[in-house]
Each structure stands twice: as C-alpha cells, then as structure tokens.
Image (cartoon, rainbow, N blue to C red):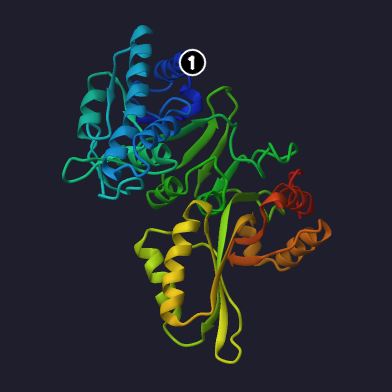
Amino acid sequence: MRSDIIVQKYGGSSVADPERIRNVARRVSAAYERRSPRIVVVVSAMGKTTDQLIALAHQITPHPDPRELDLLLSTGEIVSIALLAMALRDLGHEAISLTGYQAGIRTESRYGAARILDVDPMRIRRELERGRIVIVAGFQGFTEEFDVTTLGRGGSDTTAVALAAALEASACEIYTDVDGVFTADPRIVPEARQLQDISYEEMLELASQGAKVMAARAVELGELFDQPILVASSFSDRPGTLIHRGVSMEKGNKVRGIAHDVNVGKVTIVGVPDRPGIAAQVFGPLAEAGISVDVIVQNTGQHGKTDLSYSVAKGDLSKAEALTREVAKAIGAEAVTTAGDLGKVSIVGSGMQSAPGYAARMFEALYRAGINIEMITTSEIRITCIVAADRVPDAVRSLHAAFELETRDNP
C-alpha cells in the first residue's frame, strides 16, 4: 500500500534562474494545496552550474582530486534547494532544505559515479509530519566515512526515484524541459510523437542508447521497486509520459522509439591471437578502470589470428586506447587503431521480439539513406547500429519514417 507522499524532481533548466525557481515554487505550492500536503522535492543545480564548477576546478589543476571535486560539485544543488525553500516560504509554506547526507542517502565510495546503497528516510518523514515541504539536493549522497559523493549524469533522477521507493510514494514525477518521452528527439524529427506510456524495459533501452530524457539508473530503480515514474514538462500542464510495468501496447506498435548518441568511440585490435582467455585479458583492465564497453565485434579467426573491436563513450576513448595498447603488446597483437567520429542509432520496442523482419527493415532504411554500418548489436527488444557521427541525424529521420512512428498505429 503506497503512501500519500508525492516526490517531484526538477532539473537544471527548470531552476536555471530566480524566476524559474519561483515558477517551480508555484507548481509545488499548487500540488501541496490540491493533491497532498506531503511533498518531497528533489532539485538539480541551476542551469549549467555543474559544468561551470568542473571548469573552475580545472582552472586550479588539470587533475582535480576526485573527493574534492565531488564536494565542490555538491554545492550546486545546495544553492538550488536553499533558494527554492526561500521561495516556498515566501508563498506562505513551511519548507526545509536537506542535503543528501541530511536526507539519509548513503552511497558507495566511488567518486563521480557513486551508486546508492540505501536510503534512511527518517529525517524526511519527521519533517513531513511537521507539515513541511521537504526539498532534497539531488545528485549527491554520503559514504560510511561521511564523505560527500556525486551520482554521475542523471543523478538527480536517481535520487528522486530512490526516495520515492524508500517513502513508498504514490507518485514520482520527473519535471524537465520536454513534455515527455517521444518516438525520437523532436529537435531532429519535428514530427516525432509523444508516447502516453512506456514500459520500464523499453525506457531503459532508450536511455541506455542515448535518449537523455531519463537517466538509465533511475529507470532501473523504478523497475526494481515497481515505482511508476511520470516524465513531464515544468513549463506546461501537459500530461507527460508514464513509465510503468503494465503498458497498454498501442495496436500494431512494435517499435516504440528511436534513440541516438554521437558520443561513441571505437577501438580495434588487429591480429589478435585466436585462443581461449584473450577476451578476458582485453576487457578485464577496462572493467577495473571503470570503463563501460558497449558493442563488441570479433571477426572469424583465420590462420590463428582475428580482429576484435569494441565501442566506448568518446570521453573514455583515450584511456581505453592506452590500456588496450598495453594488453595488445602483452598478448602479441599486431596493432591497435581507434576512431572517435562515430555515433549509434537504435530502434527499441518490446513488440519486436515476437515479430520477424525488423532488422532487415532497419538495414534497408539505412542503405537507402546511403549510411554505412560499422557495427551491429542487438537485444531482445533493441537493434543498434554504429555509424558515422555526422550521419546520425539522417539515420534517425530515415528510421523514424521507415517504421512510420509519426502515426499512432505503425506496423
């Protein structure tokens, strides 16, 4: 049985300046008066504050200490929560701001991308019982040693879903600068259509493959605790998109959306000895360094040699290349090459797993657009192609048209 608590999250664009903070305060006030007197609000840093703080740190040193950098970055959200609490008090509400530590968000000791271990919502519940609106700093937590950590990209989404789960909230609402989840990025495909709802599994695939409307880790938490998540705009009253388990599939709608990402790099090891254990030697050091590998392709071995390629985020490319060169030398590979001008495009839809022909249709659409495919990877509900970064927008438009996603009942 869920409580009457509502958790709302507002992103950086929603609190980018004083007027937008006052707008958020008015929205929270309206929810408090019409829907529930027990509201928890999670807030990101104002606008580009996090990027500015990172730039500031690099003006001091090219290699900021991870612990101190997390402490610095956490101040962005602290500014936001204090200002929002002031705005709500100005509207006549009792409000209190809490840091991640004060809100009981405990994390592992991995600076820059810590994962939440548990949430102790006792302080939040106590403040709600006093009739206060609770404003929590997103993106941050604390370790067993009481050090401040940050949760990585999309960390405020993760904070909101984790709090909603811990509080057994009746609603978890993620407010951003878009109206919801669309069949593709509307900036690339103007005719992209907003989805009324989407499953956790489909949203996780879209988020993992580049859709920036929702953080993948937040979706994972939502699915784990069966916490429905509403994604909507903080600048309008449109209904948004509900992410939940029981999706009513639109008739005939197999492909739900197109995701893309231009932040892709590729590493290829040429002339790898074709023997057991090589893959473990190649990818072990990458895992130890915290580098996530996406697509992996190994050619059929000939004359005892094979070529092995994998993709990573472009920001990890130089580090991945250095580690791979060390491994290549140790295993006797012939060469290592890299490419940093790549992107990926994916079609996602749970209906694909029970119907044939989607891969062929995707490849045909890209062929007709004159787009060369570098690598391919699939899951039960996703097909992803690595292509040249400058052709990604063309690929998204071609696939959106090929699968007729601008209409409600695409085949």
Depth check, front residue: 334 or 69: 334
State the residue position of label 1.
23
Q: Is residue 344 left or right of residue 366?
A: left
- Local crowd size for mark 1, using a 10 Å CA cut-off: few (<14), some (14–19), many (≥20): some
Numbered disc 1: secondary structure: helix
Q: Quadrant of the C terminus?
A: bottom right
Q: Residue 55, percent across and down? A: 42, 34
Q: Residue 385, percent across and down? A: 65, 61
Q: Residue furthest bottom?
A: 303
Q: In the figure, 392 relative to 64: above or below?
A: below
Q: Is residue 103 left or right of residue 152?
A: left
Q: Residue 137, percent across and down? A: 33, 30
Q: Quadrant of the N terminus?
A: top left
Q: In the figure, 126 relative to 369: above or below?
A: above
Image point 73% across, 41% down: which residue?
A: 189
Quarter of image, res 58: top left
Image point 36% across, 60% down: which residue?
A: 289
Q: Kindly tell me whether residue 292 is visible in this rendering.
A: no
Image point 74% across, 62% down: which residue?
A: 372
Depth check, front residue: 211 or 26: 211
- Counting the numbered discs, the total is 1
Q: What amino acid does circle 1 point to?
A: Asn
Q: Residue 307, percent across and down? A: 58, 78
Quarter of image, res 298: bottom right
Q: Residue furthest right?
A: 368
Q: Residue furthest left?
A: 145
Q: Kindly tell me whether residue 123 is visible in this rendering.
A: yes
Depth check, front residue: 367 or 383: 367
Q: Is residue 401 left or right of residue 90?
A: right
